[in-house]
Image (cartoon, rainbow, N blue to C red):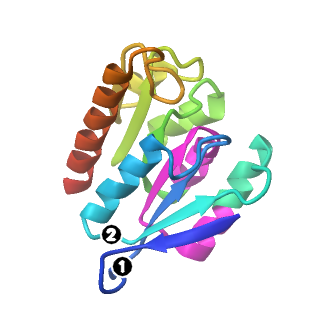
Amino acid sequence: MRIVEEGPPGGVAPGAPALVLPGRGYDVDQPVLRGVRDELLATGRRVLSLSWTEVPPRPEDVPALVRFLLDDLRPCLVVAKSLTTLALPVAADRGLSGIWLTPLLDRPDVGLAAARSHPRTLLVGGTADPYWNRTLAHESDREVLEFEGADHSLEHPGDPARTADALGRLRVRVREFLAD
């Protein structure tokens, strides 16, 4: 794995960074994570982005990996996509704010952690995503951004305009979330 640090031009922003974690096959330069990273950087935050240099970890190893990263990097915010949302229970235990993109809410530990997560938590999913549990998301009493008909990549297959609109709406919501 590799971690890349980004920040404002001319130096590194003070304070704790945001940690951006990829999915299994969805790296930090793909549209959804790139859009969130751009919004983080636009607010002047330092951003640490993780990339897999080899095979991604097994799902059962994700919580321990993220626990290690949290201990080492001490972020103030976690952004995770799909596979790495398996660390939602770890972040909830530590009271960390987060943006959880296509969280694996079909897994009981992740779904229950959403409800006990930091009050500044944003859950983002699509209704055509088999891992999204809209009932758990909405009952979690956390902020939810849901895209009707979007898949696990938050895309609308065969409809690039609708996919672009969803990405734009995600960026606006992330901007509002970060401003609060």
Q: Which mark is residue 77?
A: none
Element marked by disc 1: loop
- Towards the viewer: 54 or 135: 54
Residue occupying the point 20% across, 46% down: 176
> Neighbour class for label 2 at 10 Å: few (<14), some, many (≥20)?
many
Q: Is residue 86 magenta?
A: yes
Q: Is residue 23 left or right of residue 33?
A: right
> What's the magenta bit mostly, secondary-structure-wise?
helix
Residue occupying the point 73% across, 60% down: 53
Three-letter amino acid code at the position of disc 2: Arg
Whether tag 2 and tag 1 are in contact, CB under 8 A, the answer is yes
* Range shown magenta: 67-93
Upstream in sequence: badge 2 or badge 1: 1
Residue occupying the point 50% across, 52% down: 29
Q: Which dot, 2 or 1, sits closer to the camera?
A: 2
| Residue located beneath label 1 in the image | 15
| Residue located beneath label 2 in the image | 45
Residue 10, image quadrant:
bottom left
- Towards the viewer: 43 or 96: 43
Q: How many marks?
A: 2
Element marked by disc 2: loop
Dividing the image into 4 quarters, which one contains the N terminus? Answer: bottom right
- Towards the viewer: 40 or 60: 40
Q: Is residue 35 magenta?
A: no
Residue occupying the point 47% across, 56% down: 78
